[in-house]
Image (cartoon, rainbow, N blue to C red):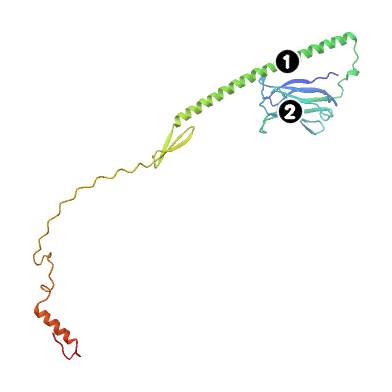
Amino acid sequence: MLRSKYKFSLDIKLTQSQVSIPVMLNDTIWGFYINLIDDGKPFILPDGCRAVFIAKKPDGNTLFNDCIIEKNNIVRYDFTANTTNVEGVSYCEIRIYSPAGRMLTCPRFTMVVDHRVLLDDEIIFSESEKNTLDSIILSENARQQAELERAAAEVERASVAANAAEAVRKAEEAVARAEDAVLRGVTHSWEGSVLTVTSTIGTSSADLKGPPGADGKDGADGKDGVDGKDGKDGKDGNGGYTPIKGTDYFTEADKNELVTELLNRLPRAEEVSV
């Protein structure tokens, strides 16, 4: 039996079953080599994607197995013991999940498991038929290899184009950020003598008040002023005159009245001389 893979393409945009693959019952050596395309062009998967092979088998069981992603657009699935152990039609799909776990696509196909596929030791043919078969096999292998190389080259071109597009996108984002920075400009604010300036590259501030200055020199003493003249006594009734004790305070009658009042306040005195 040929040790090879079933190679075919699946379009990610088609929802119906796209191809029917005949396989042998209980085969665990072959596998699927699936080229993902998008409207005839290679479908490039982002790094970190996950591929899962799902098959609803004729016995009602559903098979889930991880696949291997090669060259960012080729899904390889190697048969397990449970892949071809039930004869009949299995409805299959390849689910592709993004690194974040979101399902991106699930192209479908059918797998027909048949025990009537002949084994190598059941085939009888002549030497000439064997040579012809060998030539056919070599030609088919060469064709398949050329197809793989063509697909790889297409993937490489697509990757280069994707990288160029990504570079353009990043450049456009950088220009947009620069234009946005120009539009925003620079702002400033004052708090006392502290000036704060804010721009797109950050915020800085500085205290514009300098250190205290040195004390100034003492000024020269002023000249003595001229003494003022004595004021005149005021007229009676207008103030400005200081009474003289013994002259202006009391009259003679007032003095005698005061002595009399004093004597009256001393009733026990027997003799008083004035």
The residue sitting at 77% across, 23% down in the picture is 32
Q: Is residue 136 visible?
A: yes
Task: Name the residue type under label 2.
Answer: Glu
Mark 2: which secondary structure? strand
Residue 108 is labelled as none
The residue sitting at 82% across, 13% down in the picture is 137
Q: Quadrant of residue 216?
A: top left
Q: Residue 242: horizontal and vertical position, in percent?
A: 13, 67
**Image quadrant in which the N terminus is located:** top right
Left/right placement of residue 172 relative to residue 8 reads: left
The residue sitting at 12% across, 80% down in the picture is 255
Q: Which residue is mark 2?
A: 93
**Mark whose residue sits in front, 2 or 1:** 1
Q: Nearer the viewer, residue 18 or 137?
A: 137
Q: Residue 181: horizontal and vertical position, in percent?
A: 47, 30
Please tell me how crowded label 2 is: few (under 14), some (14-19), or many (20+) other residues with Cα within 10 Å.
many
Q: Is residue 40 visible?
A: no
* Mark 2 → mark 1, Cα distance in angstroms: 23 Å
Please tell me how crowded label 1 is: few (under 14), some (14-19), or many (20+) other residues with Cα within 10 Å.
few
Mark 1: which secondary structure? helix
Q: Quadrant of residue 230?
A: bottom left
Q: Nearer the viewer, residue 228 or 200?
A: 228
Task: Name the residue type under label 1.
Answer: Glu
Q: Is residue 217 above or below residue 167?
A: below
Q: Which residue is mark 1?
A: 147
Left/right placement of residue 138 relative to residue 240 reads: right
Q: Residue 4: horizontal and vertical position, in percent?
A: 81, 19
Q: Nearer the viewer, residue 22 or 153?
A: 153
Counting residues from the start of the chain, the first of labels 2 and 1 encountered is 2
